[in-house]
Image (spheres, grey):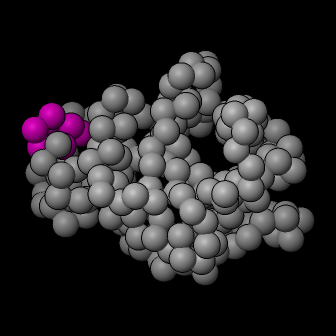
Amino acid sequence: MAIALIGGRFDPIHIGHLIIAEDLLEILKVEKIIFLLSHNPPHKIVYSSFEDRFNMIKIAINNYEKFEVWDIEKKMNLEKSYSFLVLKEILRMGYKNLYFVIGSDQFENFKNWYNYEKILNIVKVVVVQRPSKNYNYPKDLLSKVKILNNRLIEISSSEIRKKIRENKEFRFLVPCGVYEYIIEKKLYLKL
C-alpha cells in the first residue's frame, strides 16, 4: 500500500494543507495521506502545544477516511525530530512504498537536512510547490525527487497566526472546527 507522509508543524493546519493532501491523493494515486506532526522540529519554532496541533489536525481530517494523523514523533521523543530518524522508524514498523512530501521552501535547503542523501535512498521525496517566490532548487537533486504539479495555495500558518494576533478575520482559512478550537483555546493571541 502506497502512502504519502506530509510532515510539518501544522501550527495551525489550514485549508491549503487539505487541498494539497487532496492533490496528492489524485496525482500520486496513494491509498492514504498521513499527517506527520512535528514534535521537536530542528529548525523551526512551535507556537502551540503538540496536543493542540494534534487535536486541530484530527478535527480538520475528521470524516476523511483516506487522511490520518500520526503522533510517532512524540512517541519517539527525540531531542530533535530529524526526518531521517522518523522515516527509518516508519520503515522499521513495516510500511513500504512511502512518499515523503516536503514544500519547495524545504527542498531549497534540503542539503542542510540531517542525512538528506539517505532520505532520498529510503523514500520517494515529493516536492509540493508553493507560490510567491522563485525557489533556488539544488540542481543535482532534481532528478532524485518528484516536483508535483499541484495547485498553488496562497495561505500560510504564519499569516493565520498574524491575523489572530492582530484580531483580524481568519475564519475561512481553516476548517470550521479548527476555527472554533482556536477561538475556544485562545491560541496564537500572544506570540
Picture layout, residue 140 above or below residue 67: below
Q: Closer to the camera, 170 or 168?
A: 170
At 59% from the left and 52% from the top, the residue drawn is: 5
Q: Quadrant of the C terminus?
A: top left
Looking at the image, residue 41 sits to the left or right of residue 166; the answer is right
Q: Quadrant of the N terminus?
A: bottom right
Location of residue 83 (image quadrant): top right
Say whether residue 186 is magenta: yes
Say whether residue 187 is magenta: yes
- Residue 111: tell me if it is visible: no
Looking at the image, residue 96 sits to the left or right of residue 59; the answer is right
At 39% from the left and 30% from the top, the residue drawn is: 50
Where does the image place residue 181, in percent across and percent down from the top left? 17, 43
Q: Closer to the camera, 138 or 146?
A: 146
Looking at the image, residue 11 sits to the left or right of residue 122; the answer is left
Picture layout, residue 62 above or below residue 72: below
Q: Closer to the camera, 1 or 101?
A: 1
At 14% from the left and 36% from the top, the residue drawn is: 186
Looking at the image, residue 172 sits to the left or right of residue 160; the answer is left
Where does the image place residue 179, in percent across and percent down from the top left? 17, 52
At 23% from the left and 59% from the top, the residue drawn is: 175
Where does the image place residue 64, in percent across and percent down from the top left? 36, 60
Residue segment shown in magenta: 182-188
- Residue 150: tell me if it is visible: yes
Q: Closer to the camera, 104 or 58?
A: 58
Location of residue 81 (image quadrant): top right
The mark total stands at: 0
Location of residue 153 (image quadrant): bottom left
